[in-house]
């Protein structure tokens, strides 16, 4: 992939576009910029290059579109390797921690920030402001751990978390002025205050006008999870593919959370947590990439070697997590028939979209990853048991020969693989667990007198 023919679709006010601009500037990449007239209209080029989300940014490199800002920044780092320091750390564990905190900013912090700006009630805005303030303190702690006493989250140079968090600094300042409250201050967040007033803020303006212990040996591998969780299944499948032995520590989802879980994942308090040489790694897709990067000789790579193909795998795995799985969950746990009906429509549409993605990624082979099980195979394949359970409950074949024939064949190949079949649970057992889980969730959501 040569440096020519680089185009960015974006809008000047978007922090997500800002991330891409910062990464391109850090790598000294010349590019053509196309300003989208948002929110008034979306260009044909945007609709064509990002038909799934129809959002900016889109990076077009050699006529290949790459979507989603975090995926684009990783793509830039993987393609332009000689022109500047790496944006992501070279060490696999440190890379996993960078991905975790970038995802935290994306999924939790920026969401609360938007609610402060666009919340419809004062009560909602107050709750969101409390989340933002709490998030700032968590990011202050993360800065201390990741920076190792240097100027940036990335150490001596601007890194992945710097770009992701730094792109929000202007919006944080806007909210500070509107709310007359200092979110980043020397009193509460001296590290971040110094950082924001230091090179991140300055370089952004110019461009746009967890502690580690022990070694990384193959020993001391542990998975904290529960048998029914598709996110835990992903980790186990990856370990089986790589022939890595591990200790399986069962967490009872229907009981109070264990001290080990609360200690090892204090941010989300969720499974899976993967321990390697006593280092905890959280979030299933981050764990998969970590496993693939550490155990490189025992099996084929889970992610493709080509940067563009890797970006597409990350995009579709994120689609499964961000769009497809939430709809599946609402279909299982939805409190009203209307909500379930809407969720069913989303799931059916999602299977058709994924059928199309399979055609592109598989290149006529058995898996999304081609000849071998890959990143998207694991992300989607871990849901197959739940897809069958939920399909039976709503008396609908969610993956069918009529609408998704390629996914039907793929599901059979995936489920029969030696690394998979011992991980996927019995469907009847899963259905029974689903009923108990639904009852617990609905009880928690029920209004109290």
Image (cartoon, grey):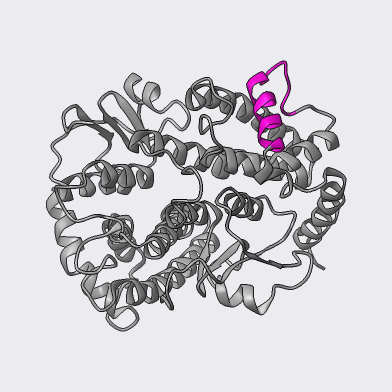
Query: Residue at horizontal 78%, vertical 70%?
Result: 255
Query: Residue at horizontal 69%, vertical 33%?
Result: 342
Q: Position of residue 78 (x, y in %)?
A: 29, 45
Query: Residue at horizontal 45%, vertical 51%?
Result: 297
Q: Magenta stretch?
A: 398-416
Q: Would you say residue 262 is visible in this rendering?
A: yes
Q: Position of residue 440 (x, y in %)?
A: 81, 60
Specify the farthest residue to the bottom: 187
**In the figure, residue 391 lies in which quadrant?**
top right
Q: Position of residue 193 (x, y in %)?
A: 25, 74
Query: Residue at horizontal 80%, vertical 40%?
Result: 389
Q: Would you say residue 208 is visible in this rendering?
A: no
Specify the farthest residue to the top: 402
Q: Main structural element of the magenta stretch: helix, strand or loop?
A: helix
Q: Quadrant of the C terminus?
A: bottom right
Assess whether residue 41 is covered by the magenta stretch. Answer: no
**In the figure, residue 93 lies in which quadrant?**
bottom left
Q: Position of residue 166 (x, y in %)?
A: 28, 59
Q: Is residue 371 above or below residue 137?
A: above
Judge by depth and name the residue closer to the eye, 394 or 405: 405
Assess whether residue 413 is covered by the magenta stretch. Answer: yes
Q: Is residue 208 above or below residue 436?
A: above
Q: Quadrant of the N terminus?
A: top left
Judge by depth and name the residue closer to the eye, 121 or 277: 277
């Amino acid at each position: 992939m040569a440096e020519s023919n680089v185009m960015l679709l974006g809008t000047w006010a978007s922090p997500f576009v800002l991330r891409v601009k910062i990464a391109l500037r850090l790598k000294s990449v010349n590019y053509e910029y196309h300003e989208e007239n948002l929110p008034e209209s979306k260009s044909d080029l945007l609709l064509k290059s990002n038909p799934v989300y129809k959002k900016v940014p889109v990076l077009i490199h050699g006529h290949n579109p790459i979507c989603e800002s975090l995926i684009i920044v990783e793509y830039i780092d993987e393609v332009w390797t000689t022109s500047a320091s790496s944006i992501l750390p070279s060490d696999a564990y440190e890379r996993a921690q960078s991905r975790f905190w970038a995802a935290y900013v994306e999924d939790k912090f920026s969401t609360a920030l938007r609610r402060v700006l666009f919340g419809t009630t004062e009560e909602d805005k107050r709750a969101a402001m409390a989340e933002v303030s709490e998030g700032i303190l968590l990011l202050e702690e993360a800065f201390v751990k990741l920076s190792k006493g240097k100027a940036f989250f990335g150490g001596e140079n601007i890194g992945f978390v710097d770009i992701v968090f730094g792109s929000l600094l202007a919006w944080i300042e806007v909210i500070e002025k509107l709310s007359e409250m200092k979110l980043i201050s020397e009193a509460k967040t001296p590290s971040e205050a110094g950082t924001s007033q230091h090179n991140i803020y300055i370089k952004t303006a110019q461009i746009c006008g967890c502690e580690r212990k022990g070694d990384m040996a193959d020993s001391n591998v542990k998975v904290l999870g529960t048998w029914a969780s598709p996110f835990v299944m992903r980790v186990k499948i990856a370990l089986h593919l790589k022939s890595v032995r591990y200790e399986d520590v069962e967490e009872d989802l229907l009981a109070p959370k264990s001290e080990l879980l609360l200690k090892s994942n204090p941010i989300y308090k969720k499974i899976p947590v993967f321990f390697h040489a006593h280092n905890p790694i959280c979030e299933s897709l981050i764990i998969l990439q970590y496993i693939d990067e550490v155990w490189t000789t025992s099996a084929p790579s889970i992610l493709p070697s080509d940067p563009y193909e890797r970006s597409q795998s990350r995009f579709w795995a994120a689609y499964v997590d961000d769009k497809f799985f939430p709809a599946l969950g609402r279909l299982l746990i939805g409190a009203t028939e209307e909500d379930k009906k809407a969720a069913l429509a989303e799931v059916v549409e999602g299977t058709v979209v994924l059928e199309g993605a399979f055609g592109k990624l598989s290149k006529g082979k058995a898996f999304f990853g081609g000849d071998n099980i890959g990143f998207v195979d694991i992300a989607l394949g871990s849901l197959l048991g739940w897809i069958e359970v939920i399909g039976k409950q709503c008396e609908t074949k969610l993956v069918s020969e009529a609408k998704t024939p390629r996914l039907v064949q793929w599901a059979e190949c995936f489920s029969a693989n030696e690394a998979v079949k011992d991980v996927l649970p019995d469907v009847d057992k899963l259905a029974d667990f689903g009923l108990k889980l639904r009852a617990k969730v609905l009880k928690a959501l029920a209004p109290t007198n």
